[in-house]
Image: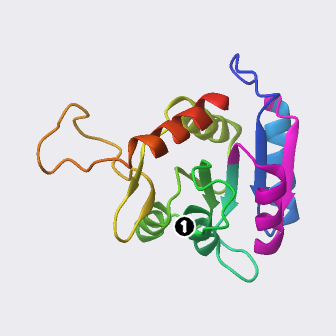
Amino acid sequence: MSGGYRFERLKVLVVDDNPHMRKLVVTILQAFGVINIFEAGDSEQTWKMLREGNPDVVFMDWILDRASGLELIKKIRTSNQSPNPFVPIIMLTGYTQAEHVRQARDAGINEFLAKPVSVNAIMMRLVAVIEHPRPFVRTKTYFGPCRRRHGDEEYRGPERRSTMDDEADNEAEAHAQAV
């Protein structure tokens, strides 16, 4: 079912306030061969799991208890206490309107996954964040994966958005290769 991928060393955090949805995603990940799966149902548990478990990938719901998934993603990306601001985050939500997708992108997600989920969709997003990590960018108002999905990667003109400094790029690349 995992298409030849070996996910047994992958550490995944599944964040959803609905225990049934968490169980569904966990079951699918286990079918892929993921062994190290952490679960969180609220923002406090999520922050604790991020710090203690150091996951390689996070599946994050939009709605949580005290903080929205978007607020938590922004905290992961920008807080000085964030254990890994580069962790790939896959937004998992029923809010699929274009404005919600833009808000999630602007919060710093790597991939967007609409509920109800399918086994194939989860696999595609998981493989995407592993095989095709996007460079991270820092602007005055944003830090996260490059929001541009399409375009001429060879363009080097004056309006080309530059990525972060080489040290941060190397850190992100090393983390992606470790996954």
Q: Quadrant of the C terminus?
A: top right
Q: Quadrant of the N terminus?
A: top right
For the residue pair 105 and 99, the one nearer the viewer reads as 105
Badge 1 element: helix
Does residue 34 appear left or right of residue 122 in this picture?
A: right
Quarter-wise, where is residue 47 in the image?
A: bottom right
Q: How many marks?
A: 1
Give the x, y percent position of residue 24: 83, 50
- At 46% from the left and 63% from the top, the residue drawn is 101
Type of amino acid at the residue the image marks with label 1: Thr
- At 14% from the left and 51% from the top, the residue drawn is 159
The magenta span reads 32-57
- At 30% from the left and 41% from the top, the residue drawn is 150
Q: Is residue 36 above or below residue 94?
A: above
Q: Residue furthest top?
A: 4
Queried whether the magenta region covers residue 34, the answer comes back as yes
Q: Is residue 166 above or below residue 42?
A: above
Badge 1 is on which residue?
Answer: 78
Give the x, y percent position of residue 75: 60, 70
Does residue 52 appear left or right of residue 149 in this picture?
A: right
For the residue pair 120 and 75, the one nearer the viewer reads as 75
